[in-house]
Amino acid sequence: MTETAELWQVPVTYAAIGATQAEDLLRYPPQGFRPMEVRVRIGHGPERWDFAWVQAMSWGIQRRAGLHVELVDSPSEVSEGTYLPVAFDKKGNPIQPATAGEAGEATYAPDGSALVRPGDSALLKWMLWPVKIPARVVYVIDEPDRKGFAYGTLPGHPERGEESFVVERRPDESVWLTIRSFSRPANRWFWAAYPLLRMMQAIFTERYKRALTGPINE
């Protein structure tokens, strides 16, 4: 990120925006990137579902995994101009988002938590990492039984790529979390530390998996 540019002005550092949604991501990732997918059952029933989707849509997974999340403001015209995708059911009928309001408007969960929007930017910080890591919300999934978002890397992130966090409620009332990503080191310096980056990714993936399986009211 340049010293003069505001974070909201800086583009993501990879080309395949939204590729974590591709069904064949694991077989055909963007060239030069390493894909990853983890799926875990996190509970059962409406109470677990409500807890899980609110956490997933408000950076709660990241915070519960030990990251400090600093949201970065952007001008209202940026949010208003952000494309909000339309979801469709299995028959091809459009689905009205369960939580989203008009484009550019802040949206909130029933407990008052602010929900992510496409185009939002954030700085992520872990106590053992010396700098803040910038990220951009590149898409949001807001369907009745499937919710979450993906963020892409910005300049200053040690990797290039995208990571998604999606919770799903199945017909048997079981609730699942799916984490998908594709990534590569951001530059030659981080290539030299690639084993460390992979170890850190594995550690945080495990933390993300545990983030939604604990007590709901803690």
Image: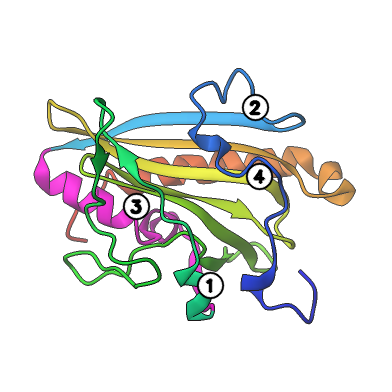
- Separation of residues labelled 3 and 2 (CA atoms): 24 Å
- Look at the image and tell me in which quarter the N terminus lies: bottom right
Residue found farthest to the front: 93
Label 1 sits on residue: 78
58 magenta-colored = yes
Label 4 sits on residue: 161
- Separation of residues labelled 1 and 2 (CA atoms): 30 Å
Query: With respect to residue 202, does 56 lie above or below?
Result: below
Q: Three-letter amino acid code at disc 3?
A: Ala
Q: Three-letter amino acid code at disc 1?
A: Val
Task: Tell me which corner region of the image, top left, top right, bottom left or bottom right, holds residue 63.
Answer: bottom left
- Look at the image and tell me in which quarter the C terminus lies: bottom left
- Separation of residues labelled 4 and 2 (CA atoms): 11 Å
Observer-side mark, 4 or 1, equals 1
Helix, strand or loop under label 3 = helix
**Does any portion of residue 215 appear in the rendered image?**
no
Label 3 sits on residue: 56
**Does any portion of residue 116 appear in the rendered image?**
yes
Q: Is residue 145 left or right of residue 11?
A: left
Residue at the (24%, 58%) spot, across then down: 99
- Write the start and end of the magenta stretch as one range: 45-74
Residue found farthest to the right: 188
Residue at the (57%, 22%) spot, across then down: 26
Question: Callout 2: few (<14), some (14-19), or many (20+) C-alpha neighbours within 10 Å?
Answer: some
Q: Three-letter amino acid code at disc 4?
A: Gly
Helix, strand or loop under label 2 = loop
